[in-house]
Image (cartoon, grey):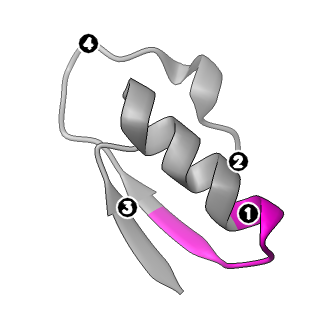
Amino acid sequence: MILVIGSAGYIGSHVVKELLSQKHRAVIKDFTTVTNNDHVSN
């Protein structure tokens, strides 16, 4: 399991996408109040 901080941003969202494509489990957290949640799914 890998923790990704800033996962709703450009780089973080691509990192999470790549991790998931390689069958890793990712825990994601973003601390900003204004984010683009299109990159984050449940």
Q: Residues within 10 Å of mark 3 (few under 14, many from 20)?
A: some
Checking the image for residue 34, the label placed there is: 4
Give coordinates of residue 26: x percent, y percent.
56, 70
On the question of residue 8 being in view, the answer is: no
Residue wearing tag 3 = 4
Report the amino acid beneath label 2: Asn
Q: What is the C-alpha distance between the residues marked 3 and 2?
A: 15 Å
Report the amino acid beneath label 1: Leu
When asked about the image quadrant of residue 11, the answer is top left
The mark that comes first in sequence, 3 or 2, is 3
Residue wearing tag 2 = 42
Q: Secondary structure at mark 3?
A: strand
The mark that comes first in sequence, 4 or 1, is 1
Q: Residue furthest bottom?
A: 1
Give coordinates of residue 9: x percent, y percent.
37, 28
Report the amino acid beneath label 3: Val
Boundaries of the magenta span: 20-27
Q: Nearer the viewer, mark 2 or mark 1?
A: 1
Task: Please report contact status of discs 4 and 1: CB closer than 8 Å, yes or no.
Answer: no
Q: Nearer the viewer, mark 4 or mark 1?
A: 1
On the question of residue 22 being in view, the answer is: yes
